[in-house]
Amino acid sequence: MSAGFQRARRPEQIEARRTAILAAAREMLGQRPVAEISLRELSCHVGLAKSNVLRYFDSREAIFLEVLDGAWTAWLDELAFADLPVPLFERENRVAGTIASTLAARRLLCELISAMAPVLERNISLEFARGFKHRAAANLERLASLVRAAVPELSADAAGVFARAVVVVVSGAWPYANPTEAVALATAEAGGAPGFEAVVAENLTNLLAGLVARGR
């Protein structure tokens, strides 16, 4: 802990301290996966004791979920689909491909999505969980609205199904596409496997085309 540490008391001081902690978390995530970052290391990086970091966040997991929320919102802020007069189903392919390519360019977002349910949501309070799930639902609704605007044949329910499936597909495809060194070598020896972007694009194209065909 920094020798000059003073507890933040005013709202702007608290927000500044939270911002500094989140910035440190993002910086560390640029160097190592979330599984390798402990609360002690994060606290040292930001210059605080663990107990002081926990004054501003419930847990290590809550910090990374906050980072996820910011990364998710930033992705949606930039996500756009070209308004092209393409045939039915080719349009679905392009929408799914756009989602896959933009996600593939955001390593931090994909890693945190893949860690969200199995790891990060396992050590948070009910109060934090309610807030995070509320924000996550808003992000899913935004994604559904963007997709439905590009594919107006989708019903609101179908667009919601698709948006939730994006999270599920990324959660499975990301660790699959980023194996350990031994598994990567064994996979290459066995003939290789499609990369993250290709897997996500294929699965989302099939789902989106299926939802349109079913008229949901």
Image (spheres, rainbow, N blue to C red):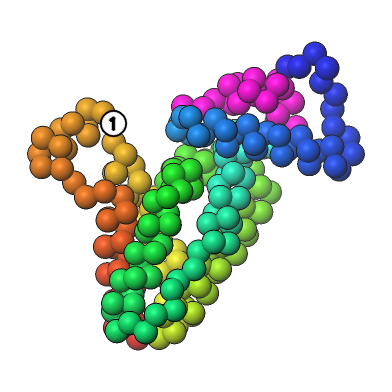
Between 192 and 128, which is closer to the camera in this rendering?
A: 192
Position above or below: 95 against 74:
below
Majority secondary structure of magenta residues: helix
The stretch of residues the image draws in magenta is 36-56
**Dividing the image into 4 quarters, which one contains the N terminus?**
top right
Residue at the spot 88% in from the left edge and 35% down from the top edge: 9
> Closest to the observer: 204 or 77?
77
Place residue 118 in its image quadrant.
Answer: top left
> Label 1 belongs to which residue?
180
Q: Is residue 99 left or right of residue 49?
A: left
Q: Assign a secondary structure to mark 1.
A: loop
Type of residue at label 1?
Thr
- State the residue at coordinates (78%, 38%): 16
Of all residues, the one furthest to the top in this rendering is 3
Answer with left or right where residue 1 lies relative to residue 22: right
Question: On the image, which quarter does residue 197 sit in?
Answer: bottom left
Q: Residues within 10 Å of mark 1 (few under 14, many from 20)?
A: few
Is residue 29 positioned above or below 105 on the image? above
Q: Position of residue 37 (x, y in %)?
A: 51, 27
Question: In this rendering, is residue 173 above or below 33?
Answer: below
Could you tell me if residue 59 is visible in this image? no
x 85%, y 42%: residue: 12
Q: Quadrant of residue 125?
A: top right
Q: Residue at x 31, y 39 (%)?
A: 178
Where is residue 84? Give x, y as percent: 39, 80
The quarter of the image holding the C terminus is bottom left
